[in-house]
Image: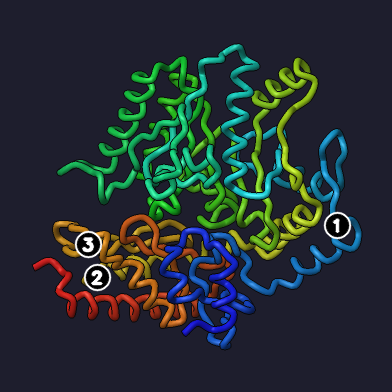
Amino acid sequence: MLTNLQARDVETLVHPYTNLVAVRETGPLILERGKGVWVHDVDGKPYLEGMAGLWCTALGYGNEELVEAAAAQMRKLPFTHIFGGKSHDPAIELAEKLKEIAPVPISKVFFTSSGSEANDTQMKLVWYMNNALGRPKKKKIISRMRAYHGVTIASASLTGLAGNHNDFDLPIAGVRHTTCPHYYRLAEAGETEEDFATRLAADLEALIIAEGPETVAAFIAEPVLGAGGVIVPPKSYYPKIEAVLKKYDVFFIGDEVITGFGRLGTAFGCEALEMKPNSISIAKALSSAYQPIGGVMIPEDMYQAMLQESSKLGSFGHGYTYSGHPVAAAVAVKTLEIYERESIFERVRAKIPQFDARRAALEDHPLVGEARGAGLVGAVELVADKKTKQQFDPKLGLAAKCVAFCQEEGLILRNVFGDAITICPPLVISPAEIDELFDRLTRALDKTLDWAVREKLLAA
């Protein structure tokens, strides 16, 4: 029987990324408060938030400095916009700080309210730029299978996951997808990681040639693919990919929505993976998710093209009501200050060896085929047969079952692509809490194994 809150929920809300039928029967988990890496439900049960919300609550819950930054800005100027030549100090200061820490040369920042909006904007800006440059046919965008770039019509088209396309009539025209850089699943027999990276660069080049280089405008990539299952490309992958992009004058969009601001122990994920994009999408940890804010970090050549078209047309006809919202910007400014003052990125680097060791140890579990990751983000992929990498029937929902066992153990994780379970705790997690996270996950895996054995689901 559903509680009163659960009953009210199912009669009023549509839940993203949820089985809409199942949630009406089970009811949602209703959370009430949080502190540090812990959240509590309405019954007071604590859960270690192993996903930092949705890859985003980097500084954990209950950070009073961020609360006060929002409250102070609410009292001073709760809202104004930056349309029509207007502005305000929080947006200006945030843009200045982002330019200072950018991993590649950046000229300007355009603010959004989410990563989806940022990647949607990226597509529009590439089209706008190529129109300014007299290249009206150079408009196609190449993404990757299993990539995740958002859920607007444009950004969901860039996303390379069938669940974001099915029955939404996506992807739209002009979007293509190339090979996912998942060595564990896609490497050919005897192929080294170096050979695999070389082949994927060749796949990209073949796609560009097939489409016509004069029609291909941009390539978009997350440093580490997040919702596609935390896929870490081979070390030489990005240099090989960039050589192809430069050869055919293809603009490189970096999607740092998940990896930006410390997740890999560096300010931006591209710094950890030898990746040098032209423009960068940001969101999530920009404000530690305390306020909805994202943005596009724009290089000078793109900005000059924007100036040219704006002059020709009389206006730059793009923007959102909440672009550079003063409260969101003020909280983001404070977030960046805390990252620097508290040496958060350096502290993440110090915790990576422990996180790596506990993650890697999970490969000894009978259900785990691969335990992959980088920095403080990882995933375990469940398999029916470790030797052959045989997958479970998707209809069994084995990873979802494991995530439910995690919840029983007081741990919140997510299952994403296939039978992958993702791990992405707040950056402020302590060493003791890292051990607690993996201890609880191990117990959940054991419960899942017991269930799978009883149901005779493992390969003979």
Question: In this orientation, which residue lies closer to the viewer: 121 or 167?
Answer: 167
Residue at position x 53%, y 52% from top?
Answer: 259
- Name the residue tied to disc 1: 78
User: Compared to 450, does 56 lie above or below?
Assistant: above
Q: Is residue 217 above or below residue 53?
A: above
Q: Which of labels 3 and 2 is toward the front?
A: 3
For residue 204, the mark is none
Instruction: Tell me the quarter of the picture where residue 388 sits.
Output: bottom left
Whether residue 267 appears in this view of the structure is yes
Which residue appears at 42% of the width and 44% of the height? 165
Q: Closest to the observer: 191 or 161?
A: 161
State the residue in front, 60 or 18: 18
Between marks 2 and 1, how big is the CA–CA gap?
A: 53 Å
* Amino acid at pointer 3: Phe
Instruction: Give the mark nearest the N terminus, 3 or 1.
Output: 1
Identify the residue position indicated by label 3 in the image.
Answer: 392
As measured in the structure, the alpha-carbon distance from the residue carrying label 3 to the one carrying label 1 is: 51 Å
Which residue reaches farthest right? 76
